[in-house]
Image (spheres, rainbow, N blue to C red):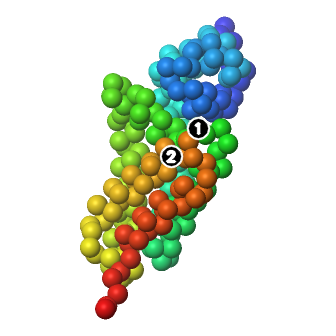
């Protein structure tokens, strides 16, 4: 009779995600995972499959949590204020990372997407979701006269996703608000309606 699992799958997955986030895929060994998750190798393989499958499950867990935070872009209200609050909250989360881990998605994009198509596809799906939320909000703001029509929603959404990733990358080496705030403020300038001379 097989033994029942005596650990919490989601808790173990969270621990694995933190290990991969801190060290990256290649630098995290199966032994590292066994130790941090508090389970044996047999349980790891039986529950999650191999290291790559575990990594993909951890990446999925992170992207789902990140997209939940991104739902702030789908709320009602003034579009410029929603984007402003979202970007500043994103900046402050970056500054509140004393371990300077950056973003798990960004780190993974750099480390693995060039040669791991399954991983690259998951990351593309994540970016597509964030861009879609920006596009919908910007389109709504343009229709309401809150956001300039000088650029399309698609162009602005792509730009804001790029700004977010830039904040995460720079935040790994410069944990000062003075370094990151200009990125947010200049980005927000692109939304402004032109005033009559």
Check the image and report above or below for 64 versus 117.
Answer: below
- Mark 2 or 1 closer to N-term? 1
- Which residue was labeled with disc 1? 101
Q: Residue at x 55, y 67 (%)?
A: 85
Q: Is residue 23 left or right of residue 123?
A: right
Pick whichever, 4 or 87, lies toward us.
87
Q: Position of residue 117 (x, y in %)?
A: 33, 28
Q: 25 or 194: nearer the eye?
A: 194
Q: Is residue 105 visible?
A: yes
Identify the residue shown where x is 27% and y is 68%: 151
Viewed as shown, does residue 184 lie left or right of 7?
A: left
The part of the image, by quadrant, that contains residue 156 is bottom left
**Percent x, y of residue 86:** 52, 62
Per the image, the residue denoted by label 2 is: 170
Say which residue appears at 47% left-offset and 29% top-offset. Answer: 56
Q: Which part of the image, by quadrant, shows the C terminus?
A: bottom left
Question: Residue at (68%, 22%) from the top-left corner?
Answer: 36
């Amino acid at each position: 009779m097989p033994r029942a699992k005596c650990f919490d799958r989601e808790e173990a997955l969270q621990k694995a995600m933190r290990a991969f986030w801190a060290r990256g895929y290649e630098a995290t060994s199966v032994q590292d995972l066994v130790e941090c998750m508090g389970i044996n190798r047999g349980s790891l393989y039986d529950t999650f499959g191999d290291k790559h499958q575990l990594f993909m499950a951890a990446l999925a867990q992170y992207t789902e949590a990140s997209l939940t935070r991104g739902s702030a872009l789908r709320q009602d209200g003034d579009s410029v204020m929603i984007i402003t609050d979202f970007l500043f909250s994103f900046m402050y989360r970056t500054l509140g990372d004393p371990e300077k881990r950056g973003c798990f998605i960004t780190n993974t994009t750099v480390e693995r997407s060039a040669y791991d198509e399954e991983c690259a596809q998951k990351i593309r799906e994540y970016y597509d979701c964030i861009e879609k939320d920006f596009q919908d909000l910007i389109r709504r703001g343009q229709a309401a006269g809150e956001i300039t029509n000088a650029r399309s929603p698609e162009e602005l959404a792509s730009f804001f996703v790029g700004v977010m990733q830039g904040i995460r990358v720079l935040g790994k080496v410069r944990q000062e608000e003075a370094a990151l705030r200009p990125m947010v403020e200049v980005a927000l300038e692109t939304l402004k309606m032109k005033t009559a001379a």
